[in-house]
């Protein structure tokens, strides 16, 4: 590739019923060629997963000192519907910047559920005048 040259990223909705069935809600196909990249998916979540894979490939290319991703092809879909992470903030404080960074990592690892544990029964300290027995 020539320095300063741009490549195109195309998002295409899967049209064949068999492809849509195989991809499901989060599956995608990513094809990287000399002309750019094409992500095919049946639903918006699939485009996000394909974008995350493309971002990972860029990271590897840059770490190896290359300015471009080599031609490749991926067809991927999740094995499990629930892929989550829990952050227990009931007894430990986490800065907003940390939570945002954690959500970014969830995107890259293609996790789809964020469980934010905000309170425990012993840790409840919000006074509600209408419910005095809570505090």
Image (cartoon, grey):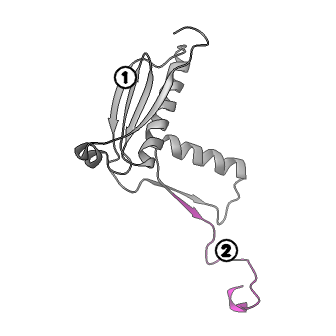
Q: Is residue 133 left or right of residue 36?
A: right
Mark 2 burial class by Cα count in 10 Å: few <14, some 14-19, many 20+ = few
**Residue 64 included in the magenta stretch of the image:** no
Which numbered disc covers residue 72? Answer: 1
Relative vertical location of residue 57 with respect to residue 125 in this rendering, above or below: above
Q: Quadrant of residue 89?
A: bottom right
Circle 2 sits in a helix, a strand or a loop, which is it? loop
**Residue 127 included in the magenta stretch of the image:** yes
- The secondary structure that dominates the magenta segment is loop
Residue 3 placed where, x, y %? 59, 9
**Of marks 2 and 1, the one in the foreground:** 1
Mark 1 burial class by Cα count in 10 Å: few <14, some 14-19, many 20+ = few
Residue 121 placed where, x, y %? 61, 78
Residues in magenta, as a range: 114-135
Circle 1 sits in a helix, a strand or a loop, which is it? strand
Point 61% across, 13% down: residue: 4
């Amino acid at each position: 590739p020539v320095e300063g040259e741009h490549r195109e990223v195309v998002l295409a909705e899967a049209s064949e019923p068999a492809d849509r069935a195989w991809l499901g809600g989060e599956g995608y196909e990513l094809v990287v060629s000399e002309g750019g990249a094409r992500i095919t998916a049946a639903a918006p979540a699939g485009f996000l997963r394909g974008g995350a894979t493309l971002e990972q490939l860029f990271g590897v290319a840059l770490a190896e000192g290359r300015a471009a991703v080599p031609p490749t092809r991926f067809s991927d879909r999740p094995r499990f519907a629930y892929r989550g992470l829990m952050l227990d903030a009931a007894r430990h404080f986490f800065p907003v910047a940390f939570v945002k960074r954690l959500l970014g990592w969830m995107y890259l690892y293609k996790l789809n559920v964020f469980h934010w544990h905000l309170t425990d029964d012993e840790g409840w300290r919000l006074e509600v005048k209408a419910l005095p027995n809570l505090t």
